Image (cartoon, rainbow, N blue to C red):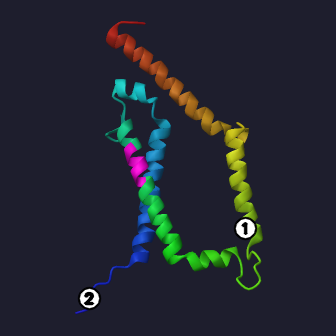
Amino acid sequence: MKKYRFRWRIFTSLALFIGTMVVTVSGIALYVAPHHRIANEMGWTLLFLDQGQWWDLHLTSMIVFMLAFGFHLFKFNWRAFLHYMGRKTKGAIRHPVELLVSVLLTVILIWSTLANWAVTNWVLDLHKWMRAEYVESWQEWRAEKYGDG
């Protein structure tokens, strides 16, 4: 009978995929969630989890995702990564166009977010609008519950 051998490469790839799904879903939940105080007072939940639980899930799964990513890069794909970055003998970058486009897109995304450019502004504006709607709903809920208003 053949002895089972645990395959770390398969495990790491599956952990990265599952981690990506968990971080994505928890990120979406936190994106649509109201302010923490309002969420707590109203008892806001999404898929049976409150905002604090979504934060905990997001942070812990992000750490696991980062560990799996590090293992994936340094254990299984370091040579391929170095191959993409350049040749040992000539010291030249092998794929300069892809590297440049990746860096430029990242810089544009960061810059446009911090500068409130229209490229990313709509994502932030939608988030602010949803939060404002929660505040309005919370005020109505509070007025009904406590009779103030």
Q: Nearer the viewer, residue 122 or 6?
A: 6
Which residue is at the far top? 148
Residue 74 placement, left or right of 141: right
Query: Which secondary structure class fits the magenta region best?
Result: helix
Determine which residue is flagged by label 2.
3
Q: Which type of secondary structure does the marked residue at label 2 adopt?
A: loop
Q: Nearer the viewer, residue 31 or 9?
A: 9
* Residue 116 in the image: above or below residue 102: above
* Label 1, residues with CA under 10 Å away: few <14, some 14-19, many ≥20: few
Examine the structure image and report whether residue 60 is included in the region drawn in magenta: yes
Q: Which type of secondary structure does the marked residue at label 1 adopt?
A: helix
As shown in the figure, which amino acid type bears the numbered disc 1? Glu
Who's the residue at 38% across and 15% down the image?
142
Location of the C terminus by quadrant is top left
User: Which quadrant holds residue 83?
Assistant: bottom right
* Mark sitting earlier along the chain (1/2): 2
Residue 84 placement, left or right of 12: right
Q: Report the disc number at residue 66.
A: none
Residue range (magenta): 56-61
Q: Position of residue 27 (x, y in %)?
A: 48, 45
* Residue 23 in the image: above or below residue 94: above
* Residue 143 in the image: above or below residue 83: above
User: Which quadrant holds residue 10?
Assistant: bottom left
Determine which residue is flagged by label 1.
98
Q: Position of residue 128 (x, y in %)?
A: 57, 30
